[in-house]
Amino acid sequence: MKKIDISTILASAIHESKNQVGTLLYQLQSLKDAINNNDTHQKKIISIEESLKKLNDEWVEYLYLYKLASDGYELHVDTFLLDEFLDDQVFALFPSAKAKNLELEYVCDPTLTGVFDERLMTAVVSTAVYNALRFAKTKIRISATKNADFLVISVEDDGKGFNQSDDQQDVFLEGNTGLGLYFAELSATAHVIDTVKGFIKKESSLTLGGANLSVYLPQPSADQSLSFK
């Protein structure tokens, strides 16, 4: 009997579940459009919708994680204007922040550009923001800067920050699955120029006082092409 590749079966099941969540989101949107904004059930519908969106993003993350871990993901890098990229992230995630009465903003030099895989970084940012929604008191900030030969994309909050004094130091991005931080790290290290790999840092936020996850992505020099591996 042929050996069953359980990882492929699980990946297929996740893909199908993701499609089902997409269908539910479409039906929920139709329901929202059909009722009055002042309806007493509106808040419940919005809460369900945001939970489904988070679940849908998690399915996307798991599929990328499977491909990254099995070397089945082909990196698609390009040059992006960070102001546009971060604006897109805030636009997509703002309803989730609003549902929790949290402010979500982004900060970057409007001329800053970076070279990276947009799909992976979108998934990493959304994962980090969804986690920050659990701990932030009032505000979450996404930012992008240039640090030496690295593009740095950070997600900060004004929550309690990291607790490095006990065994809970890796709670950030762990959620219920324990895969969020692993996914962020794999996504960063997938970006390689020559022998320089991307990496992540967990720090305290100097601006908001809470937690800060920063993803460092190597950038090609002026005489290098987009030679990511």
Image (cartoon, rainbow, N blue to C red):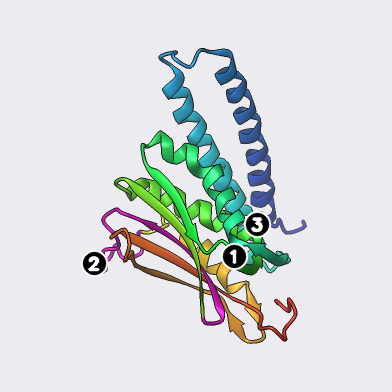
Q: Which residue is mark 1?
A: 111
* Kind of residue at badge 3: Arg
Residue 24's label in the rendered image is none
Where on the picture, by quarter, is residue 218? bottom right
Percent position of residue 219, x then y = 62, 77
- Specify start and end residues of the magenta stretch as a single range: 148-171
Q: Which residue is mark 3?
A: 119
- Structural distance between the alpha carbons of marks 3 and 2: 34 Å
| Residue 176 is inside the magenta segment | no
- Structural distance between the alpha carbons of marks 3 and 1: 21 Å
Q: Which residue is mark 2?
A: 166
Percent position of residue 80, x then y = 66, 63
* Kind of residue at badge 2: Asp
Percent position of residue 227, x then y = 73, 79
Q: Main secondary structure of the magenta part?
A: loop
For image coordinates 73% across by 59% down, the residue present is: 3
Marks 2/1 in contact by CB < 8 Å: the verdict is no
Under circle 1, the secondary element is loop
Q: Is residue 47 above or below residue 30?
A: below
For image coordinates 37% across by 59% down, the residue present is: 172
Marks 3/2 in contact by CB < 8 Å: the verdict is no
| Residue 160 is inside the magenta segment | yes
Specify which label sits upstream in the sequence, 2 or 1: 1
